[in-house]
Image (spheres, helix red, strand yellow):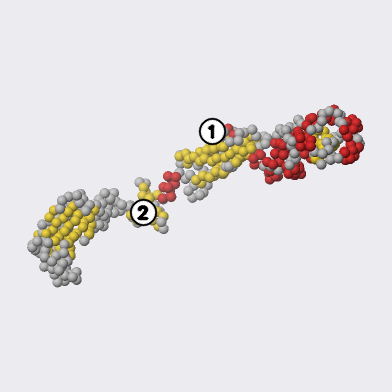
Amino acid sequence: MKLQLKKASSGVTLHIFVLDSSATDGSGLTGLAWNTANLVCWYLRHGANEAQLALATLATLTTAHADGGFIEVDSTNMPGLYRLDLSAAVCAAGVDSVSLMLHGATNMAPVLVEIQPTDVDLNDGVRGGMTALPAIVPAAAGGIITRGTGDGQLNALAGIISGLATSGGQTTTQTAIAAVQNNTRTTIGLPGVMERPDAGNTRFKIYLNNYDTAGNMEAPDAAPTVAVANESGTDRSGNLQHPGTHAEQTTMVEISTGRYWIEYEMASDHTMEALNFTFSIIEGAVTRYADRGAIVVDTTAVDFTAADRTILERLTAERADVLTDWIEDGRLDVLLDAIPTTAMRGTDGGPLAALWTDARAGYIDQLKDIAMPAKVQGLVDRLTAARAAYLDELAAANLPTDVTVLMALQGRNRRIDNITRVGGKITGYRLRLYGNAADAAAETDELLTINATGTYAAGLLTDEMEIEA
């Protein structure tokens, strides 16, 4: 048998059932009395030694409580059921468990009772025996507030509390909440990216909207103010301006009730940096802050077009390698170094040597000094789709780079024509190597018809360079 009793309970009466150990049908044992031979009752409180509860007589079932009182209920109608009165010592405070056993009589199965003393009184319908809680008495001093329309009660309808009790009478819950929140509802319109202009100044508009708790526009106590600083804490508030006069100021200008704006001026020489805008709104004499961030970028970072990217992507790693190979001590230097600096001889003959003047030789020398453009943009502008294709072909040609290889080629006669000169430097030419004397003689005759002043036309080295075997 298990039961819960409030700690320090007194006058506790139990009804216990005693099995007949000689029966096989689970029937109860009848005829026991407080003084039946060998019948005893013992109890054990947690953490203490066992103690005996002395049994005592009871005149009737309705006799007043008596510590240890024991009597049979009804041997005919309720065989095996008895009344047992506990002493105050059994239920005294201080422990959380008590075990009680009744045994000893002939044919009696031992009866075990387990008791859990608690701080809660399950029989107290007011506050469960917890006296620290106030009684549920609406409007009474220290009483618990309950639902209802009377004094000291909350009227909850469809989950909404319509009123709260205050020293000044009834006030709506909405008003009470608004007093706590100070009616502050704010939204801010601020560009996340501010593009500085290529030249001059530009202005960015910043908006602030203030609402009440119902979502209606509402003016704060005063016009909001703004402060601006970069990520290092350097103040940038001097760039804030009045939207109309463009005079420097940090107080926002009212457009309409609850709606304000201000401008931030950006100059072409402003630093590219992150900015933090701090807005101060005073509502109900309480200051509220709102922060927003923006980043200053260069116009190129925003205006870079798809066409720009297409041009830039033409300068692949392979094409850059070809340019480097030809210009920086590469194949171009090899070819130039292979040209004799002495007078022409062999099958070239006197006429060809006469055309090879010191001035024209100087043009070739200048080719060796050609440098890459100082700016990558200059190279990108010149690298058209057609010229990019030329570089791809040069990369695939796998031309020899060793002078000895070039010199070993059959026929060492050379011819240079289509020399292009711009600004005093040769920027294009065509070099042909001949495989036999007949071809060389024919080309030599043709060369005699070239105007002695050369050809002056604009172009780029990679446009007019060919190598023919």
For mark 2, does the 10 Å Cα neighbourhood hold few (<14), some (14 to 19), or many (20 or more) residues? Answer: some
The CA distance from mark 2 to mark 1 is: 53 Å
Which percent across, then down, holds residue 178? Answer: 44, 46
Which quadrant of the view contains residue 385? top right
Which percent across, then down, holds residue 94? Answer: 20, 49
Q: Name the residue under label 2.
A: 154
**Dot 2: element:** strand
Residue in front for this viewpoint, 335 or 378: 335
Q: Is residue 262 visible?
A: no
Which quadrant of the view contains residue 73? bottom left
Residue 40 in the figure: left or right of residue 351: left
The amino acid pointed to by label 2 is: Leu
Please determine whether, in this image, residue 7 is positioned above or below residue 198. Answer: below
Please determine whether, in this image, residue 188 is positioned above or below residue 137. Answer: above
Q: Name the residue under label 1.
A: 232
Residue in front for this viewpoint, 88 or 291: 88
Mark 2 or 1: in front is: 1
- Which quadrant does the N terminus fall into? bottom left
